[in-house]
Image (cartoon, grey):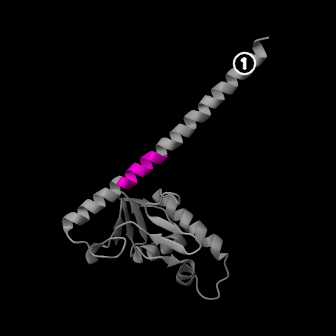
Amino acid sequence: MYRFGQFELDVDAGEFRHNGRRVKLQPQPFKLLVFLIRRAGSLVSRDDIRAELWEEGTFVDFEQAVNFAIKQIRDAMGDSADHPLYIETVPRRGYRFIAPVDTGARGVHTSAGRAPESTTTVRLQKALWTNIAELRLADARRQRLIRIAIAGAILIVVAFATYVLVYAR
């Protein structure tokens, strides 16, 4: 069992949960997420991913398959490639899981894989990480609302201009 932010990944049960609710994740993205979490804080090269997820001799458009799997994972977590909370892209090299991971019975580890100094530090780190995630998600929602408001304003201006051109004669 791995916990990070508001998520839980139960490898044995094959389940991925957000705030206790199951999130659907296809088998390849699930395997990739497990692989990244197990190597949290370390760069995982695209070749490492290929070797882990596809047997030798498997014919697949590997680049597209990895990109699609990463996109599915990010979508399931509400993560962003531009401002990542969980999965950092290292251009032309691979990916790095950057969130602190609680590994259940084995204890909590930071994204760099070091054991924390105290339980209080761990709780503060998890609370801080959760707050950062919530703030980034709220910011993304706010930016979407601003874009919708701008689009609405443009639509009103265009409608008014059309009205003036048609009926002002």
Q: Residue furthest right?
A: 169
Q: Residue furthest top?
A: 169
Quadrant of the rendered image containing residue 6: bottom left
Image quarter of the C terminus: top right
Q: How many marks can you see? A: 1
Nearer-the-camera pick, 124 or 69? 124
Residue 90 percent coordinates (x, y): 53, 70
Amino acid type at circle 1 is: Tyr
Residue 37 percent coordinates (x, y): 42, 73
Nearer-the-camera pick, 162 or 65? 162
Residue 32 percent coordinates (x, y): 50, 74
Side of 38 where 88 appears, left or right: right
- Mark 1 sits on what residue? 163
Side of 115 where 76 appears, left or right: right
Nearer-the-camera pick, 15 or 131? 131
154 within the magenta span: no
- Residue drawn where x is 52% and y is 67% of the image: 89
Q: Is residue 6 above or below residue 65?
A: above
- Residue drawn where x is 58% and y is 86% of the image: 55
- Which stretch did the figure color magenta? 132-140
Nearer-the-camera pick, 64 or 146? 146
Image quarter of the N terminus: bottom left
